Amino acid sequence: MPSKKVKFIKYFLLAIFFSLLLLICVAGYFLYQLKDIAQDLKRTFIPSGVSRVNMSQLKVGDVQYFSKGCSVFTIKQVAGKESLVNIFSVPKQFMGTCKNLEDGFSYDGEYIVLKVCQMAFGAGGCGGGRYRYRISNGNNSNSGDHWEEYIGVTWRNGEEYEAWRRVGSTSSRADSIKKR
């Protein structure tokens, strides 16, 4: 039978091992976040010479939109040059990842819709998210403001509607609804 001192050392080393493992995971997560922040800063203005390969493309009227990863870009004139400008990035989840779905960038005649796969750290499967931006009714500013996220289904007078709220809102109520 091991002595108390041996047991103590065994459990102490085990505690140190798990503490270091946790520290490595947390450090990796924060380094990943720093990389994302650096990439966001870099991609604010992407020179027009940069390849747009592997970007989903969408043209609404005279305006072109591109999607890569969980971001939406448009082309703007900056200092007389065409540049890709990031107008929307899906909000980051704590210790989560995000990727654009293959068929996840579309225009339904009124809204640009971005469908993404968001996965929490250590979780399997895809917790999908949908985001939309109204293009019609003169809202062609391309500023990227007023994006909405899908929050579920609601019912009005016995009819089913999609419920949407502004990105960043903490309200549980829908800011807008759309008949399914």
Image (cartoon, grey):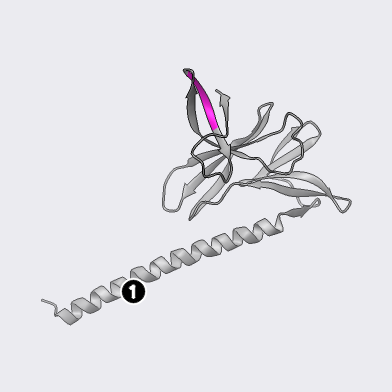
Relative to residue 131, is residue 173 drawn left or right? Answer: left
Tell me the residue at 89%/51% (across/down).
80
Choose between 10 and 91: the one closer to the eye.
91
Q: Is mark 1 on a helix, strand or loop?
A: helix
Q: Position of residue 82 (x, y in %)?
A: 83, 48
Q: Position of residue 48 (x, y in %)?
A: 81, 50
| Boundaries of the magenta span | 159-163
Residue farthest to the right?
A: 80
Tell me the residue at 69%/59% (across/down).
41
Decide: few, some or many residues near mark 1? Use Cα within 10 Å; few <14, some 14-19, many ≥20: few
Q: Is the magenta stretch mostly helix, strand or loop?
A: strand
Relative to residue 23, is residue 132 drawn left or right? Answer: right
Residue farthest to the left?
A: 1
119 up-or-down from 12: above or below: above
User: Which quadrant of the figure has residue 12?
Assistant: bottom left
Choose between 162 and 56: the one closer to the eye.
162
Choose between 144 and 130: the one closer to the eye.
144
138 up-or-down from 125: above or below: above
Relative to residue 114, is residue 42 drawn left or right? Answer: right
Tell me the residue at 51%/41% (across/down).
171
Tell me the residue at 55%/64% (across/down).
31
How many labels sit on residues?
A: 1
User: Which quadrant of the figure has residue 79?
Assistant: bottom right
Quadrant of the image containing the N terminus: bottom left
Q: Where is residue 53 in the image (x, y as percent from the top left)?
A: 71, 45
Amino acid carrying mark 1 in the image: Ile
User: Which quadrant of the figure has residue 73?
Assistant: top right
Quadrant of the image containing the C terminus: top right
| Residue identifier under label 1 | 16
Tell me, yes or no, whether the highlighted magenta stretch contains residue 36. Answer: no
